[in-house]
Image (cartoon, rainbow, N blue to C red):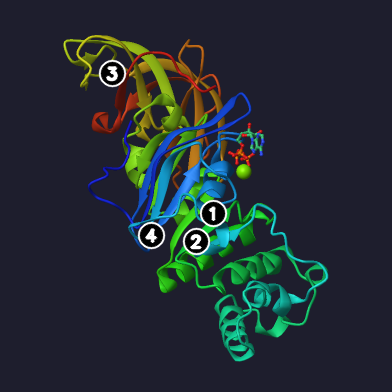
Amino acid sequence: MNTPDKDHMGYLVIDRVSKRFGSQQVLTHCSLSVPKGTVLTLLGPSGCGKTTLLRSIAGFVEPDAGSIWVDGREITSLAPNQRQVGYVFQHYALFPHLNVADNVAYGLRVRRRPADEIARKLAHALDLVNLQALASRYPSQLSGGQQQRVAIARALVLEPSVLLLDEPFNALDAQLRHTMQIELRKLIERLGITSIFVTHDQLEAMTLSDNVAVMSAGAIEQFGPPLEIYDRPTSPYVADFIGRANLIPGRCEKGFFVGPQPIASRVAEGEVTLVVRPENISIETGAGPGWPGTIAFATSIGPTVEYEIDCGWAQPLRAMVPRHYGLGTIPAGTPVRAVISDPQAAVVLAGSRVHGH
Ligand SMILES: Nc1ncnc2c1ncn2[C@@H]1O[C@H](COP(=O)(O)OP(=O)(O)OP(=O)(O)O)[C@@H](O)[C@H]1O
Ligand SMILES: [Mg+2]
């Protein structure tokens, strides 16, 4: 378990937050620390408590235990409107009877800000998301991507010190989703807003975040920069959630994984799970080291070829190799050897149970 160190307090700190709804424990001792101006993504399967944790930060849900801090100030029991926290809801929740400008200015009007301030901040917020030209349209006259930008402008207009976004791209098609992810990442960087995204899409998490918190059943399973989690997952669950992984049950003896190639392990003896990414498997023919198997399935989308290799195990071994110009794929049925190209990049984890599935 890798939770942030309280001595290195972040700008936003969540300290051992727990929440129960009726008999269901929804959050269990969740701790996180988000440095100022950075983006954290909460990643996890449906129902694991992502929205509940986000709502606790916004003040829509009151934790049973634990505390939440922004810039050294405890906000655990403050009303939502006293927190300077902007929230973009899982479904944009725009007011259908208000046009774009009135949707965006809504929060300022509720707070009874003077008219000149409203006009100035509204113009700025519309400018940030490039919606000036659509200010008088109604939500029903906007595309999904435009509605999403209105929802973001509506949160930004209040100049929050923390921005929370609950699956903001869900309604968008893949291409627009990617464009919006990059646009929003740039906008957040420009404004230097400390942000938390919720998603169950690991590619989105990797595109957007400085840090990722992988959640499982109400608990933070691992926390860190996305590539660090990708390279050094601390559990089979995380290895399989961030990227794709071959989880190979086996055992260690004298500090090495017992198999066709020597792989050094911190676990000296006993049952282990070897985590090998598909891109770390190369396919060889003829005599030599590696796991013997047969090509079971091959598919290519152009730059790479993905193989399933039948090694006689419960699960096929997955390999992803570069495709060279003009070459096809190795046909199914071909006998091959699966070789770990970089033994250093294989991760040995104690225990053989692959949980969470
Ligand atoms: N107000 C509530 N009352 C009772 N149970 C709730 C309430 N809100 C959430 N839950 C339960 O808490 C659990 C976590 O819900 P939450 O909405 O936080 O999940 P999530 O990770 O955001 O899921 P999704 O990816 O589907 O949005 C679920 O089992 C849900 O049914
Ligand atoms: Mg949710």
For residue 16, say whether it is visible.
yes
Q: Residue at x 39, y 32 (%)?
A: 277
Mark 2 and 1 residues: CB-CB less than 8 Å, in contact?
A: yes
Residue 187: x, y in percent?
A: 48, 71
Tag nearer the camera, 4 or 1:
1
Tag nearer the camera, 4 or 3:
4
- Label whose residue precedes the other's in the sequence (4 or 2): 4
Tag nearer the camera, 1 or 3:
1
Instruction: Work out how far the residue at label 2 is from the one at label 1, CA to CA, in angstroms.
Output: 7 Å
Instruction: Work out how far the residue at label 3 is from the one at label 2, CA to CA, in angstroms.
Output: 60 Å
Q: Quadrant of residue 35?
A: bottom left
Q: Residue at x 70, y 66 (%)?
A: 147
The image quadrant where one finds ligand 2 is: top right
- Label whose residue precedes the other's in the sequence (4 or 1): 4
Residue 13: x, y in percent?
A: 37, 50
Q: Secondary structure at mark 4?
A: loop
Which residue lies under the disc numbered 4? Answer: 38
Amino acid type shown at disc 3: Pro
Dot 1, how many residues are within 10 Å of its Cα: few (below 14), some (14-19), or many (20+)? Answer: many
Residue 211: x, y in percent?
A: 38, 49
Q: Secondary structure at mark 1?
A: helix
* Mark number displayed over residue 83: 2
